[in-house]
Image (spheres, rainbow, N blue to C red):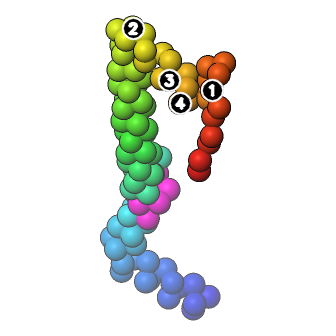
Amino acid sequence: MNRLQDIWSYIRRHKYSITLIVFLFIYFFLDENSLMRQREYNREINDLKEEIEKYRAEYDESTMMLNELDENPAAIEQIAREKYLMKKANEDIFILK
């Protein structure tokens, strides 16, 4: 019984400190909007922004290639040769890596 009274008196003496510690623990770790989750969300947002930039660059490159194909018929032959390894009837292709 004496041990229980000691614990209770300690709690009464430090109730504000204990309350602050519990609040900070909940705020930093358990809450839905905790700092840990905010850090995860910010990391995910940055990853998505990088992915958006990658796809935007790919889109710009594809748009430029499409415009070139519309303007230059020789570009179709060049892309067919380079990308799809097509050849004319009297040619041989050597692939070097």
The residue under label 3 is which amino acid type?
Ile
| Whether label 2 touches label 1, CB < 8 Å | no
Which residue is tagged 1?
91
Visible in this render: residue 66?
Answer: no
Helix, strand or loop at label 3? It is: helix
Residue 80 occupies quadrant: top right
Helix, strand or loop at label 2? It is: helix
Residue 56 image position (x, y, % from top left): 37, 29
| 38 relative position to 7: left or right | left
Q: CA distance from mark 4 to mark 1?
A: 14 Å
The residue under label 1 is which amino acid type?
Glu
At x 57% / y 91%, what residue is drawn? 2
**Nearest the camera: 68 or 47?**
68
Please tell me which of labels 4 and 1 falls first in the chain: 4
Label placed on residue 70: 2
Which residue is tagged 3?
79
The residue under label 4 is which amino acid type?
Glu
Residue 97 image position (x, y, % from top left): 59, 50
Q: CA distance from mark 1 to mark 3?
A: 16 Å
Please tell me which of labels 1 and 3 falls first in the chain: 3
Q: CA distance from mark 3 to mark 2?
A: 13 Å
